[in-house]
Amino acid sequence: MSTRREGRECAVQLLFQWAFCHEDSEKAFIAYWAEQEEKSHKDVRKFTEELVRGVLERREDVDAMITRCADNWSISRIARLDLSVLRLGVYEILFCADIPAAVTINEAVDLAKYFSSRESGRFVNGVLDRVRKELDQGAEVS
């Protein structure tokens, strides 16, 4: 498995955890890595922590985009696992210029299917595709 794929899996798990307890990210990292010895390779950890910090720092922008692109779905109605995948995907699309949107969407769909369900994969695909289309049409990020 690639470093980035492993990092995304770890990031989704950490964001899911954060969705419930909103704990300090540094404490969450320490506790998480203590439990994940097999995934504690420095490149995986670095990529994971960059993603999680980025999502948490830009959460308002990310959530605003999700709200705009998830028709008839408020943030509070989206399953927390699906929301964690969406937050990661939207963050990558908006703020990680070195990662093609198509790669991000593919990875997010796979993560949603892996951690949640096939229906979650479809939902995530629809929302992220709409985010990509909005950006292609020149929508501003808050």
Image (cartoon, grey):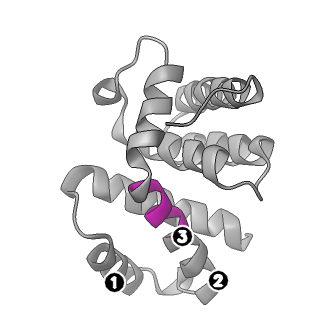
Looking at the image, the residue that sits furthest to the top is: 72
Q: Main secondary structure of the magenta part?
A: helix
Q: Earlier in the sequence, mark 2 or mark 3?
A: 2
Q: Secondary structure at mark 3?
A: helix
Q: Which mark is residue 50?
A: 3
Residue 82 seen anywhere in this rendered image of the structure: no
Please name the amino acid that badge 2 sits on: Asp
Q: Position of residue 88 (x, y in %)?
A: 53, 50
Mark 1 to mark 2: distance in Å? 16 Å
The residue labelled by disc 1 is: 30
Mark 2 to mark 3: distance in Å? 11 Å
Q: Which residues are magenta?
A: 50-56
Q: Is residue 124 above or below residue 1?
A: above
Which residue is at 44% across, 51% downward? 58
Mark 1 to mark 3: distance in Å? 14 Å
The residue labelled by disc 2 is: 43
Q: Secondary structure at mark 2?
A: helix
Which residue is at 59% across, 68% downward? 7
Q: Is residue 10 above or below residue 56?
A: below
